[in-house]
Image: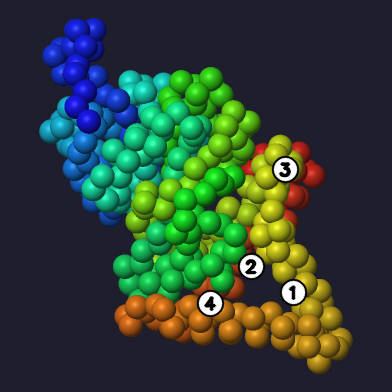
Amino acid sequence: MTRTMTSDEAASTGGTPAPRATVIVPARNEAATIDTCLDSVLAQEGVVFEVVVVDNGSTDGTAERLAARAAADPRLTVLSNPAPSIPASLNLAVSAARGNWLVRVDAHSTIPPGYLARAVSRLEEQRWVGVGGRKAAVGRSPVGRAIAAVLNSRLAVGGSVYHWGTTETVVDHVPFGAYPTDLVRSLGGWDEAVLNNEDFEFDQRLRQHGELLFDPALQIDWNVRESIPGLFRQYRRYGRGKPAVALRHPDGVRLRHLAPPALVLWLAGAAATGTRRPRWAAVAVAPYLLAVGAASTAIIRTAPESTDRRAVPAALVAMQVGWGLGFWEGATDLLRGRRTRT
């Protein structure tokens, strides 16, 4: 569709069409991936857009890379937010956005050609308060590919449609969504008191104004953690942020959110029993180990040949136990009246 620039737009931009969309990218220590991310964004066609990257106090050369790229491409604006806060960085980007539509892209991900144009097109249908697509996990090493295989499997992530969905549907959450700029501003943007699960919390407020669409044609390739300890720490952080968000939005709690905390309690009980009755503890843990083994076998069948197959069950356990342990830590934070920090 061809769009003619209005005289007001031309006057306000020195003859350059005003952007219809603003891509917002929070970044912190992303020197390994920021160039490929921006390459995929800046190559988008079919819509006039700008890119606003907010650097979160990087110390690995990310800020210098961003400055060089901004000097070479007028579509790119780089802002600085030294405090390592994703919601604060998102809000800073929103304050600078000139587009009618906001499209969030993660700094360690890439988007395919046509992604931005499709996101804008779906928003312009005026049927949705937000749209998003599949978060396809990508690994760059044998262990990373094992982690990616787990995160892309319904057996591991359950009802999180955005990990594996292939059918367009209304959902309660999308990762790295696209939204009307005015609506985001009217909601006050992302809640800066929510330092983890900030996207889920935002989507729950957003859904009070309409429906959120999952469109599988909008796929973002997301680079996973490349080690099991890294995956564990990541999911522990995710889990730790969940109790505060659940307290604000209890209607957004699903069974999949409660299963890992229950698992951690079960394993802790088995461990305590094991000091006195090891056979009972073994019997208690056996069903979980069998389930991990069965799920791992199924996941391995569809994993690339270059996958470290031994890492698949370890990734499953790290993700589930990390999230569950973090959940109880977050609950403890609430009881102690502390704000969860990354």
Q: Residue 314 carries which label?
A: 4
Residues at marks 1 and 4, CA–CA distance in whole angstroms: 16 Å
- Label 2 vs label 4: CA separation? 10 Å
Q: Residue 176 location, x and y as percent?
A: 44, 44
Q: Are the two marked residues, 2 and 1, in contact with CB atoms closer than 8 angstroms?
A: yes
Label 1: which secondary element: helix
143 or 155, nearer to the observer: 155
Tell us which disc is closer to us: 3 or 2: 3
Q: Name the residue under label 1.
A: 267
User: Marks 1 and 4: CB-CB under 8 Å?
Assistant: no
- Picture quadrant where residue 305 is located: bottom left
Q: In which quarter of the image is residue 179?
A: top left
* Spatial CA span between label 3 and label 4: 32 Å
Residue type of the residue flagged with mark 1:
Leu
Above or below, comparing residue 92 to residue 322 in the picture? above
For mark 2, what is the residue? 321
First reached walking from the N terminus: tag 1 or tag 3 = 3
Q: Residue at x 52, y 49 (%)?
A: 169
What secondary structure is found at the residue carrying circle 3? helix
Dot 3 corresponds to which residue? 251
